[in-house]
Every structure is written in structure tokens, then in C-alpha cells.
Amino acid sequence: MFFNNLAACSLSLLVLLQCWTLLVCGFRLTPSYQPHQNRALTLFSSTSEDGAHCYGPLSSTFSELSDEMGGSGRAAVIWDCLRAGIDPNLYYRNDSGIDSSDKAIVESWLEAMSADFDANDISLTKNDLLGKRKDQGLGADALSKLQKLMKQCRSSAACADDSVTESIHTIENSIGSISHIKVSADGTTKLLIRLARGYEVESVIIPWLDKGFSTVCVSSQVGCAQACRFCATGKMGKMADLTAEEILCQIYFANKVCRIVSSIAAAGDSATTLPPCDNVVLMGMGEPADNAVAVVRAVSTMADRRMFSLAQSKITVSTVAPNPSAFTTLGSSPAALAWSVHAVDDSLRKELVPTTKFSMEELKDGLVEALKSRSKKLRRTMLEVALIDSVNDSEKDAKLLISLAQSIMADVEGSKVVVNLIPFNDIGHPTYRTPSMEKVLEFQKIITDGGVLCYVRTTRGDEENAACGQLATSRSK
């Protein structure tokens, strides 16, 4: 039993490790998908005319959505669609239930994979995806209520273009749409999502074909204010917080892409597939602690069995910890916590994360208190380190990490701490360099010899470097 549990834990940690790798190191990406221009409307959590806070269909709690729709059955029907990456605003207005953008995703994927296959031969019928409620449907009254919910949460001041109007408010013209897809040789897929208010964020789908699932890595902000020296996204600065609706739409689109790509495989191109998304990590653009209200609400939706229905242990929120209370705030969400440490020595950490205002001891105490208040299933945490040659890869640095990990485990009963090493990828820094693999493995050995589990990231889809945040600011043609 112990070894079974250890194996399961190891797989989860490797999934998280892989996501961090993709964002720091990037990968070679092939042809892009740009189905249409951004539209006028935007839907996100906002304040309505009477001053009440309102949310859209993705970010409303199940109870809130039930109240708005006039019954939990209607809310369940809507979520049967959303969970599968299907827009209920279109599905129940269209005899075929087909979203016109689905075929564009098919064509883009086939082009990206250089597949010799006719997109017209692929069936996109969704009738078998919605389970026992597929025949229940949404009547005119329910569809009207859904449209009202979407419109009342709209803020025209945030629209990218006020001149365009839509007869039907959909996910794509009201929240965001996929503006760019890039696929690596191993199927790892990066999505650039253009939000209705004009910003762009990136998400990554990482397929684990041997395990039968994919992991989606999502962003919580546009840019980031933490300014980590080794991260390209940090160079952008913070441009905007994402709403819970905008965070969740990334999972919606990831599920949509996985479903459509599975249709390609079902049509006969079995070498081309993306398994369903079963893991989510908030390790994309942004610092979750700087947008905690939206992040906690979004994670609650991810874990709700009536909504995205993800296991709590398969959702991870990563933070650099701007302050000790960040762990408690993010720890209120039903997800595992990861800490972007990068260095235990205070002066060195200040160099790598210049916005640091608290000592490592103060931050560690914050993590300990947060872990103590959590269930034992959620007391697993990861210490992440972007390993930079001759900067934070010395024997002293390794031993400080051992002490930090052991201290946390000693202070928190039932906790598990793992160190995650990510060799630095060049982002144009004048002095930072990637350590040799020999040095990385030596560093890992010191930590494992010290009794702490330690992983080194494995390379997935990095035929070409595309550092964290670059996809949002430039596109390969």
C-alpha cells in the first residue's frame, strides 16, 4: 500500500513538474489557429447597476446559477455542456448543436500535426457527451434566463470594441476565444486566449498518453508584478487581474480542444489525440496570491462535483508567496499548494525575486500555519527552484533546501514536501546561464541523500525555446 501511494504521489508531482517546465522552458510550436476577430461583449464578475456583485455561468456557484436559472436541473444541464467544452447558448439553439468554431480547431490541429486527413470526414456531433440529461434540454424560458445572466454581468467599459452587437451572447463573444494554437511534436498544446476585453493569456495542455489524461496549466493574471529575474512573464509587469470567469474559461477551452481532437482520433487518425483534462495547475502567467479572490472562487468551481468535478488533489496553486498570509488565503481553496522558493538564503532570494519583502523564516511560518489547518490529503506541498548556473546551485543551497523541507515536515504532522528542480532556460538575461545536467544531478543527489524527495524536470515539447509569457506578446508564423 505504501508503494502504491508513493507511486501515485510521484505521478502527480511529475505532472506539476512538467507544467512548470513548459512555462519556463517552452517548446517548439507549429501552425496557428485564428478563427475570428475579437468581438465586443465581455462577461466577467462585476457590479450590476443596483450595486450587487454578479458572476457569469462559469463562475457562479451552483446554487447561484440554480437561483438565476429557476432550478438546479437547469443548472445541471448547463454544466453538462460547460464541462465538455460545449456552449449551452449554442447547443440548445442549434439542431446539430455544433459550434462553428469547432471545425476551425479541427483544421488547425490537422495542419499542426501535418496529418493527411480530410476535416470534413470528422463528426463533431455532441449528443453522446451529455449523459442522462441530454434529452432534458433548455426551453425558451431557460435560454432567455441564461442570456440575461450573461448580459447583466457585462461591463461595456471593458469591451475591446463597443461597436459590435450580437444577437446571441456566447462564451466566445462574451468571455474569450482561442486566437492562436501551437502544437509540439509530442502533442503538447499551447493556447492563446483572447479575452473579450482585449487582453491575451496563455494556457498549456500537456497530454499523458500512457496514463490516459491531460493536464491543463492556466493563468491567473495578464503579466505578473513579482518581477522574478529568471521569468519572461515577470518582464511584462502586471497588466490585469483575470476574473474567475476568465480563469475558468481556460479550462472550458482546454476541454473543448481535447474533445475535438479526440473526434479526430475517433475518425481514424489514432496517432493524433489529447486525453481528457484531469489535472489543473495554476502555474501560468501571474501570481495567484495577487488575485486571490478570483483564484479561490475559480478553484472552488473546479473542485465542485456538479461543475468541473476535479479531485482536490489534482488541482495545484503555485505561489511565490508575496507575504506569509498568502498561503492561508490560497489554502482556503480546495487544492494543493506549491511554493516557488528559488533560494532559501534571504539575500539571494531577494536578488532572484526582487519584490520579496519577508524573510524565508517568516514565509515558512506562514506555510506551516496554512498546512496545519488543511486536511491531511492537502498537506502535500512542492518547493520549486529555477536552478541557475553558479547562482543558486551550490552545495550550500542544496543543504538549505533540505533544512527547509525537513523543518516544514517536522512542524506539520502528515505533511509531504518535495523539491522540484527546473534548470533555467535562457530568456536573454545578461549573466544567468543553464547549469550542466551533471551539476543538476549532483544538486539533486545532495537533496535526496539528505532524505528529501527531489525531482528534475523532464523535457516535453521544447524543440524550440518559448519562455513563459512570450506567446502572449509574439506569435510564430
Image (cartoon, rainbow, N blue to C red):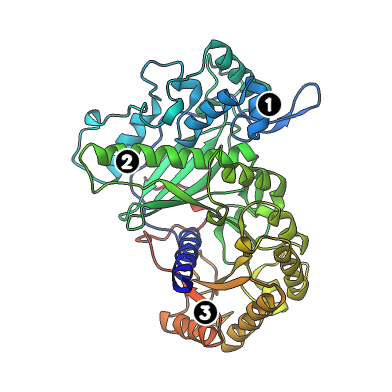
The front one of 53 and 131 is 131
Which residue is drawn at the image coordinates 56% and 23% (left, top)? Answer: 74
Q: In which quarter of the image is residue 158?
A: top right
Crowd tier of the residue under label 3, counting other residues whose Cα lies within 10 Å: few below 14, some 14–19, many 20 or above: some
Crowd tier of the residue under label 2, counting other residues whose Cα lies within 10 Å: few below 14, some 14–19, many 20 or above: some
- Furthest toward the top, the residue is 140
Q: How far apart are marks 1 and 3 (CA)?
A: 48 Å
- Please state, as top left, top right, bottom left or bottom right, where the C terminus lies in the image: top left
Mark 2 or mark 1, earlier in chain: 1
Which residue is drawn at the image coordinates 54% and 29% (left, top)? Answer: 76
Mark number displayed over residue 262: 2
Residue 380: percent from left, percent from top: 60, 66
Q: What residue type is labelled 1?
A: Ser
Residue to which mark 3 is pinned: 389
User: In this rendering, would 25 be left or right of 336?
Assistant: left
Q: How far apart are marks 2 and 1 (CA)?
A: 36 Å
Residue 69: percent from left, percent from top: 62, 21
Q: Does the residue at mark 2 contact the one at mark 1 (Cβ under 8 Å)? A: no
Q: Which amino acid does label 3 sit on?
A: Asp
Residue to which mark 1 is pinned: 155
